[in-house]
Amino acid sequence: MNVVVMRLALHALVGRRRSLFLFGIAALLLAVAGLVRWGSGASVSASAASMQNFGLGTLVPVMCLLIGTGVIAPEIEDGSIVYLLAKPLPRRTIALSKLIVALGASLVFTVATIVAGVAIAGDTSWELATALAASTALASIAYTSVFFALSILTKNPVIVGLIYALLWEGVLAGYIPGVRDVSIRQWALAPAEQLLSAHPSWGVTSDLGMTPALILLGLTVVAAIVAAVQRLKTLRIKVSE
Amino acid sequence: MSSLELVGVSRWFGNVVAVNDVTMTIGPGVTGLLGPNGAGKTTLLSMMSGFLPPSAGTVTLDGAPIWCHPELYRRIGLVPEAEAMFDSMSGWDFVYANAELHLLPDPGAATRAAIEAVEMMDSRDREIGTFSKGMKQRIKMATALVHDPDVLLLDEPFNGMDPRQRMHLLALLQRLGSAGRTVLFSSHILEEVEGIAGTIQVLVAGRQAASGDFREIRRLMTERPHQYAVSSTDDRALAAAIIAEGAADGVSLTAQGLEIQASDFGRFVHALPNLAIAGGIALHEVTPADESLESVFAYLVSR
């Protein structure tokens, strides 16, 4: 890890306008939570459904997309990444330092938002909040790593990431059983299902068992990190002629 | 003392050959990499700075290949063409961060020395985003100098500089060159290279067109045949007078006027107005037909 790379990544993250988007998205989720509480009379199953689908299924991946790409994609796009790469630092150090900052930021942001959302929409003695916080944390780590890798691997990480987040995770993984087995959202829900086994009526379910889900999440994160580091080692900077 | 060596270097992008079989050694002193836009200068510099692998050939710094060897950046300073930096940081903080990334023992002193060298101490606390193009260029220069590199690579460093800043940068580069540093800068403007007494490498359409002493190449460039398009009140009489005077090598009469070829540039431009006055002919138009840099380079290539 390199503290200077981390400091610059954090600076880039909070300095850009996209950090305002993050607060906007968080506010949107809290507003929806308020509506759910008002409409359902604080029913925990309605709270669970809204936070799973709209929260974990849609807004968490979008937040991770903004953060995971935000620490590196703009620098690759405008070429200022050369100031980091033209240094006697292993590229692995540069990649991991940036990823750590992204993971920290997205964990804090997504977990806090989901916990607050559950608290507003309806919960009994923090049970749903705890379970979904665990799932959100796992989902955040996986999504952020994947979007970070996409930033280095593709030229349009935000578009590719949005299509993946909204279409695959948001729509297909919500309805098509086969797709659900290859969905970060479903994997991440496995621990929540186990934690809430006493409340099947809340409808927090995953298509996978705890062990395969955690293995798949781990493999996804490791694959994303390896791909990101390898690609950064041989990143070709845009030739501007 | 370090030298960059390129042996048989080519780089292609799909079907497009950007750099074609270039062999050159860039040693201590200041070297200009000259060529029209699109000649492959940036591609060549990208390979020298380790941001692009050559498709064929080798690019080495004192024998070590540059691609995939980030530890060599201890000895290389890079001024990229792209203007983007970390715009919300102050000039000082950005240069300081670069010093830290180079793992320098005293980043504060190195930052001060680099910012003083580019004369930016007065504006060091302003955000980079508020800088003019020339100031950004100088801060980029400071980030490249902060670790006192042996080799300095600059891509179009004079772009956006006013004449005073340009003089200052020229002096700085010359100072580094005479201190034994290897300095290479690219430019598409012939006059920019002038005054930096050193070698130049001319690149045209990805190929090395000429290399050597600047004055030698400059002479080749100025002594080439010049083309002019001239129109006047009496083209035929003017053509006769020019030929009789021996002021040009060839004159052809066209519907638009005269096309004149002169190998002695100075003699022709002095003779033409005198001949016109003597013959009572009014000149409507005198246009150099081939003064673009491309044609100068094309001439060099065809030799």
Image (spheres, grey):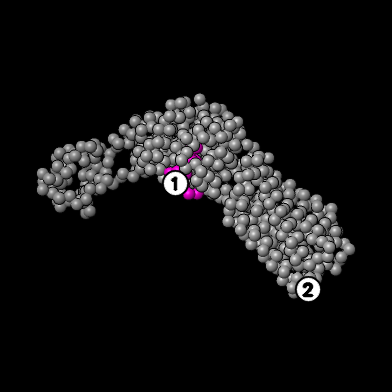
- Res. B215 mark: none
Relative to A133, residue B35 above or below: above
Residue neighbourhood size for the residue with mark 2, other residues' Cα within 10 Å, grouped as few (<14), some (14–19), many (≥20)? few
Taking the image as shown, residue A191 lies to the left or right of residue A35, namely right
Q: Is residue A117 visible?
A: yes
User: Residue flagged by tag 1: what amino acid is it?
Assistant: Lys
Q: Residue at x 55, y 46 (%)?
A: B89
Q: Residue at x 63, y 44 (%)?
A: A7
Q: Considering the whole magenta stretch, tell me its main secondary structure.
A: helix
User: Residue flagged by tag 2: what amino acid is it?
Assistant: Gly
Query: How many angstroms separate mark 2 from mark 1 (CA)?
Result: 60 Å
Q: Quadrant of residue B264?
A: top left
Q: Is residue A229 visible?
A: no
Query: Of discs 2 and 1, which sits in the foreground?
Result: 2
Q: Which residue is mark 2?
A: A41
Front position in the image: A19 or A58: A19
Measured as percent of width and height from the top left, residue B168 is found at: 40, 36
Measured as percent of width and height from the top left, residue B241 is found at: 14, 43
Query: Magenta region: which residues?
Result: B129-142
Relative to B160, residue B171 above or below: above
Q: Which residue is mark 1?
A: B133
Measured as percent of width and height from the top left, residue B197 is found at: 38, 30
Q: Are marks 2 and 1 in contact (CB under 8 Å)?
A: no
Measured as percent of width and height from the top left, residue B204 is found at: 42, 40
Q: Residue at x 54, y 39 (%)?
A: B95
Describe the element under mark 1 as helix, strand or loop: helix
Q: Quadrant of residue B293?
A: top left
Q: Quadrant of the C terminus of chain B?
A: top left
Q: Is residue A177 magenta?
A: no
Describe the element under mark 2 as helix, strand or loop: loop
